[in-house]
Image: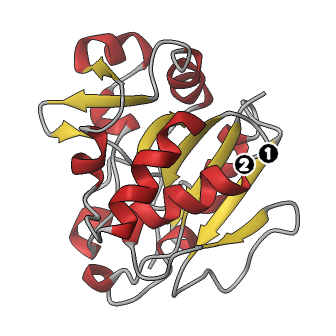
Amino acid sequence: MPSAAILAGGRASRFGGRDKSALIVDGLPILDRQMAELEAVSDDVMLVVGECAPATVPPRLRVVRDRVPACGPLGGLDAALAAARHDALVLLACDMPFVTARLLGHLLALTSEADAIVPRTERGYHPLCAAYTRACQPAIAERLDRRQLRMMDFLADVRVRVVSGKELEALGDHHRLLANVNTPAEYDGLDLAAGHEL
């Protein structure tokens, strides 16, 4: 079984500091939706937190704190890989309500081919809905030490298997699967079957 990590340590400055994992989508908090999908593919699900943490954390969710503070998602990936019980890990930003176990399982199944399995669509790479292995740890440590914190820069240091938009089509509408909520406007613009609330 692989490990899984939800990144929830950001300040959400574009969302007024709100806890985006608690936003309601189709009647459920995003965090609950994500946990249901992650628990279908992993027996080791973590919530990685930095300066900020959700007010309420389900008891079955293991909380892991950043080992190197104020390093953004790369610091979160570092903490997740260090705490993971398994060699492969799927990483997920806390503001992605529509990811599915099918998508996550597909990414994890490809970890035998490379160190990082990253979707790429016409909007670019999606390193916060991707799979990684422990082989990434030395490159991450070096980047953190040099304070080079961009996820895309780190990917230049490891073997990457790109999952194209065409490949993702077999798993569903990739626009929906990879949708995230950075701002209130993006939240309002989600294509939902039911209403949502702020």
Mark 2 is on which residue type?
Ala
The image quadrant where one finds the N terminus is top right
Residue 23 pos. (x, y %) = 51, 70
Badge 1 or badge 2: first in the primary sequence: 1
For residue 172, what is the image quadrant? Answer: top left
Give x and y (percent) for residue 74. 40, 60
In depth, the one of 80 and 122 nearer the eye is 80
Element on which disc 1 rests: strand
Which percent across, then down, holds residue 32? 68, 57
Say the numbered circle drawn on residue 44. 1
Q: Is residue 25 visible?
A: no
Q: Is residue 100 left or right of residue 57?
A: left
Q: Quadrant of residue 46?
A: bottom right
**Residue depicted at x 58% and y 16%:** 109
Q: Is residue 59 above or below residue 13?
A: above
- Say which residue label 2 marks: 84
* Residue 76 coordinates in the image, percent (x, y): 51, 64
Label disc, if present, on residue 198 of the rendered structure: none
> Viewer-proximal residue, 37 or 48?
48
Residue at 74% across / 50% down in the picture? 45
Q: Tag 2, which secondary structure? A: loop
| Residue sticking out furthest to the left | 122
As measured in the structure, the alpha-carbon distance from the residue carrying label 1 to the one carrying label 2 is 7 Å
Crowding around mark 2 (Cα neighbors within 10 Å: few <14, some 14 to 19, many 20+) is: many
Q: Is residue 50 visible?
A: yes
